[in-house]
């Protein structure tokens, strides 16, 4: 809301922004608002670059002929995250970047890290919007849709504005195909015939179960389901590690009436993995635990892109 007031009401902008969050459509809208305001006020150019480091040295050069200011848009610049505080300060202060506008966009930022804490007041977090607001957006797209159906659509789309826009577009096409008949009946028809995609409720559990069973086809199917509903890679890896560790404990100890006391596991955890014993050898289970830990560390330390970690893990696990 502060950003909206700055851009829309005061027609002003800072020289440096960091955008992150799940609601990518709203994020992109604000990038467009900023770039339009920047062009109208400065006449400058808009450039997409791979990293801030690629142009950092050019900021310090003095030109006899003043060049036009430029708006630089940068996605997932991991190099900048790992820079020193002196570099961060030189960018944030604006003394080095002068009249240029820098917009850095990250899929996610570790809130526990030094980078987040140093840049907190420059970060705009685009969280998912509230049920009430999204229902209003649905009605704006589909004016004759009932409030209850609008609320249902918001819940089905798990408050993802981009998914809501996609489903509204489908419903509009269906409505036009039926010569503009009742949109609420079109909504019911779309639900009954799976035109509206409803995400599986237990995608992570099904994925973990497939991995423990070493079922290759199911692993890739449920991994795709997890990606479609935007499950966190770290959350998936955490669940995998917990269950593979439980399987290793149960398999290495074997049947024992005191297994819960020995392992510290709850009985339901023992039952969950008992039917998956001997799908892997003990050595393979230890290797799996090391692999999952490596993948988790790679995300947190920026060694590997989070979007490719699970595919890498499956190739090496199975």
Image (tube, grey):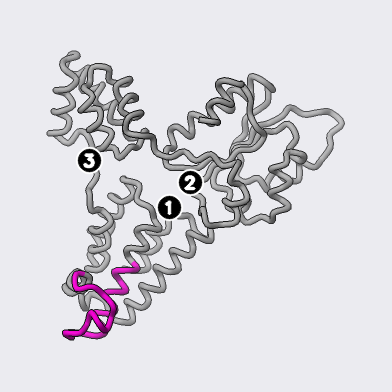
Question: Horizontally, is 15 left or right of 151 in the view?
Answer: right
Residue 82: give its label.
none
Residue 49 in the image: x percent, y percent? 61, 40
Label 3 vs 2, first from the N-terminus: 2
Q: Residues under labels 1 and 3: Cα distance?
A: 22 Å
Q: As displayed, is residue 163 above or below residue 308?
A: above
Q: Residue at x 34, y 49 (%)?
A: 227
Q: Nearer the viewer, residue 191 or 90?
A: 90
Residue 269 figure quarter: bottom left
Would you name the residue on which mark 3 appears?
Answer: 198
Residue 183 in the image: x percent, y percent? 19, 20
Secondary structure beneath label 3: loop
Q: Magenta span covers which residues? A: 241-268
Q: Is residue 211 one of those drawn in magenta?
A: no
Would you name the residue on which mark 2 appears?
Answer: 107
Question: Horizontally, is 165 left or right of 183 in the view?
Answer: right
Q: Nearer the viewer, residue 36 or 160?
A: 160
Residue 187 figure quarter: top left
Q: Are marks 1 and 3 in contact (CB under 8 Å)?
A: no
Residues packed near mark 1 inside 10 Å, few (<14), some (14 to 19) or many (20 plus): few
Label 1 vs 2, first from the N-terminus: 2
Q: Residue at x 22, y 48 (%)?
A: 200
Secondary structure beneath label 2: loop
Q: Residues under labels 1 and 2: Cα distance?
A: 10 Å
Q: Residue at x 43, y 40 (%)?
A: 127
Residue 3 in the image: x percent, y percent? 55, 30
Q: Are marks 1 and 2 in contact (CB under 8 Å)?
A: yes
Secondary structure beneath label 1: helix
Residue 307: give its label.
1
């Amino acid at each position: 809301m502060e950003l909206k007031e700055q851009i829309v009401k005061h027609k002003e902008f800072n020289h440096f922004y960091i955008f992150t969050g799940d609601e990518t459509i709203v994020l992109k809208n604000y990038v467009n608002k900023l770039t339009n305001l920047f062009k109208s006020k400065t006449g400058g150019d808009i450039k997409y670059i791979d990293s801030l480091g690629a142009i950092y040295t050019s900021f310090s050069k003095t030109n006899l002929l003043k060049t036009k200011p430029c708006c630089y848009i940068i996605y997932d610049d991991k190099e900048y995250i790992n820079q020193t505080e002196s570099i961060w300060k030189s960018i944030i202060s604006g003394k080095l970047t002068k009249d240029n506008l820098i917009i850095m966009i990250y899929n996610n930022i570790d809130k526990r890290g030094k980078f987040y804490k140093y840049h907190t007041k420059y970060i705009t977090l685009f969280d998912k919007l509230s049920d009430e607001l999204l229902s209003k957006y649905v009605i704006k797209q589909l004016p004759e849709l009932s409030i209850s159906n609008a609320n249902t659509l918001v819940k089905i789309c798990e408050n993802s504005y981009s998914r809501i826009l996609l489903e509204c577009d489908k419903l509009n096409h269906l409505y036009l195909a039926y010569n503009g008949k009742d949109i609420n009946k079109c909504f019911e028809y779309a639900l009954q015939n799976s035109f509206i995609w409803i995400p599986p409720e237990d995608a992570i559990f099904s994925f973990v179960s497939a991995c423990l069973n070493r079922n290759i086809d199911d692993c890739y199917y449920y991994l795709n389901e997890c990606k479609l509903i935007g499950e966190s890679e770290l959350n998936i890896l955490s669940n995998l590690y917990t269950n593979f560790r439980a399987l290793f404990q149960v398999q290495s100890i074997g049947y024992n009436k005191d297994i819960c006391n020995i392992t510290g596991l709850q009985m339901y955890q023992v039952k969950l993995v008992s039917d998956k014993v001997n799908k892997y050898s003990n050595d393979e289970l230890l290797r799996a635990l090391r692999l999952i830990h490596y993948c988790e560390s790679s995300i947190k330390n920026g060694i590997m892109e989070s979007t490719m970690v699970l595919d890498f893990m499956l190739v090496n696990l199975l």
